[in-house]
Image (cartoon, rainbow, N blue to C red):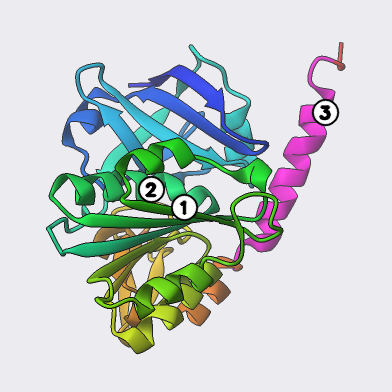
């Protein structure tokens, strides 16, 4: 069964949003879960994307992705009405949602997309939600209105000061941890290095911190080992044991090393695709 792109928008220079037909996934998915898609056939690359939202009545799921390589660029070049060959899911364990009290939700860049359904669900069960969104600059800002609607407090930071507060997310995170009372729990999703430093920020305050890991994935069912990480000194598979883990237990340095394993192949594939992309329509 192929999956039609029903609606598509560009949210920023390299960030895209789409509604994709996937009725069974739309019914079953829970916050924190993801899909794996392949665009053409069984031989095209499989990439994991978090389900940013769903409308079971319309049978669609929402995807938000950043153009960072060949497959995400191919997806960005697709139009409404085009179909994705395979969408598998929902995969992974759903986020554990309960009324913790006060939660601080930290999203870095495109990490805001998977964070939004989690923050929304946390709000719905009665948590006080403090949100920190961080971007490199104003042109990368996404989902500010959506987070403002469900947050008791929203802080936006940019690295270059072009919007909101000029700071890294760890700065307001530390200030929030210093409050009395301190937050009861933190949820952090973003680049691996950001998640690592957020965990180092919350650790001395003993604020339990969940992170959602975005490793390389292939099968998404626990069989290939591609998504292996070390948590609490033990091997875990992000696709079936996660994607969320206790951030204070994650070996981020090992994870970052493993994530560069296919850097050469990824760069070559993307360079080849971009050369082809520049020639579309010129060959005749
Ligand atoms: S993606 Fe293969 S084991 Fe997780």
Whichever of labels 2 and 3 marks the residue nearer the N terminus, that label is 2
Q: Give the residue pinned by disc 1.
A: 111
| Tag nearer the camera, 2 or 3 | 2
User: At which x and y percent is residue 138?
Assistant: 65, 45
Secondary element at tag 3: helix
For marks 1 and 3, give the CA distance.
29 Å
Q: Say if the magenta span includes residue 158.
A: no
* Residue 132, x across and y down, in percent: 44, 58
Q: Secondary structure at mark 1?
A: helix
Do tag 1 and tag 2 residues touch (Cβ < 8 Å)? yes
> At 48% across and 75% down in the image, what residue appears?
196
Q: Disc 2 marks which residue? A: 114
| Residue 282 appears left or right of 14 | right
Indicate if the residue with disc 1 has its beta carbon within 8 Å of ligand 1: no
Which picture quadrant has residue 74? top right
Compared with 218, 74 (above or below) is above
Tag shown at residue 278: 3
- Between 234 and 107, the one lying in front of the other is 107
| Magenta residues (range) | 261-281
Side of 106 relative to 129 (left or right)? right
What mark, if any, has residue 276 been given in the picture?
none
Specify few, some or many for label 3: CA neighbours under 10 Å numbering under 14, 14-19, or 20 or more: few
């Amino acid at each position: 069964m192929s999956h039609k792109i029903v609606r598509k928008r560009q949210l920023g220079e390299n960030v895209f949003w789409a509604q994709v037909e996937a009725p069974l996934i739309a019914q079953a998915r829970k916050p924190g879960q993801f899909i794996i898609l392949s665009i053409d056939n069984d031989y095209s690359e499989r990439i994991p994307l978090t389900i940013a939202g769903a409308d079971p009545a319309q049978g669609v799921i929402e995807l938000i992705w950043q153009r960072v390589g060949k497959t995400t660029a191919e997806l960005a070049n697709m139009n409404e009405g085009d179909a994705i060959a395979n969408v598998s899911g929902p995969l992974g364990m759903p986020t554990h949602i309960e009324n913790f009290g006060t939660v601080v939700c930290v999203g870095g860049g495109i990490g805001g997309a998977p964070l939004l359904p989690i923050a929304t669900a946390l709000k719905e069960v009665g948590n006080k939600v403090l949100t920190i969104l961080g971007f490199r600059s104003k042109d990368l800002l996404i989902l500010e209105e959506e987070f403002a609607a469900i947050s008791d407090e929203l802080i936006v930071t940019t690295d270059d000061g072009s919007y909101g507060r000029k700071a890294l997310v760890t700065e307001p995170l530390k200030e929030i941890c210093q409050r009395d009372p301190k937050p009861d729990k933190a949820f952090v999703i973003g680049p691996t290095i950001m998640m690592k430093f957020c965990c180092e920020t919350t650790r001395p305050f003993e604020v339990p911190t969940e992170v959602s890991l975005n490793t390389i994935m292939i099968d998404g069912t626990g069989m290939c080992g591609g998504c292996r990480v070390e948590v609490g000194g033990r091997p875990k598979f992000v696709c079936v044991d996660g994607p969320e883990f206790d951030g204070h237990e994650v070996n981020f340095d090992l994870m970052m090393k493993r994530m560069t394993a296919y850097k050469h192949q990824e760069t070559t594939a993307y360079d080849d695709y971009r050369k082809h992309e520049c020639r579309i329509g010129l060959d005749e």
